[in-house]
Image: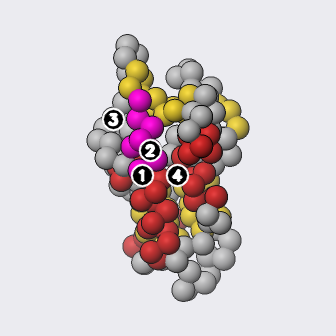
Amino acid sequence: MKNGNDPEEKLIVSACLAGFPCRYDGKAQPDPEIEDLVKCGKAVPVCPEALGGLPTPRVPCEIVGGSGEDVLAGSARVIAFDGRIAFDCTNAFIKGARAALKAAKDIGAARSVLKANSPSCGFGTIYDGSFSGTRKPGSGVAAALLSENGITIESR
């Protein structure tokens, strides 16, 4: 990671990368480096989806009609689809993104390390909204909001 030697720098990280079982499937995706940063107080874990009020586990969600930037602009939606019924989760994703941004501002974070491909945390690539496993260029809702506010994002 860039600037990882600055003892004063704090960053926010996706909670699932820090070992918290908060992914949609109720699991974590621990990254030893991220876990160490949290343990030594250099990183604060956040899960925008949980902060937005969504349960764990939860039905998988994808952005339909655009990217996180489009969700924030009101022209795309975040949809949960269980194979039979679709649910609109857009408001929870926006609420969670705002909470993640607040957490970043509260600790003075200029950087973040976020979970790749996620409809919240994905940066540069997300699932395409077809629920087929296909990806497209774009960012998740929280990643888009953090980026719009000048926070550098590393995706893992």
State the residue in front, 64 or 130. Answer: 64
User: What mark, if any, has residue 58 been given in the picture?
Assistant: 3
State the residue in front, 12 or 88. Answer: 88
Give the foreground label among 2 and 3: 2
Asked if residue 94 is among those painted magenta in the image, a careful observer would answer yes
Locate residue 49, reporting x and y percent.
40, 47
* Residue to which mark 4 is pinned: 142
* Residue to which mark 2 is pinned: 93
User: What mark, if any, has residue 9 been given in the picture?
Assistant: none
Q: CA distance from mark 3 to mark 1?
A: 15 Å
Examine the rendered structure and indicate whether residue 115 appears above or below residue 109.
above
Give the foreground label among 3 and 1: 1
Q: CA distance from mark 2 to mark 3?
A: 13 Å
Give the foreground label among 3 and 4: 4
Q: Give amino acid for label 4.
A: Ala
Asked if residue 78 is among those painted magenta in the image, a careful observer would answer no
Q: CA distance from mark 1 to mark 4?
A: 7 Å
Indicate which disc, 1 or 4, sits on the residue closer to the N terminus.
Answer: 1
Residue 80 quadrant = top left
Say whether marks 3 and 4 touch (CB < 8 Å): no
**Color encoding of the figure:** secondary structure
Say whether marks 2 and 4 touch (CB < 8 Å): yes
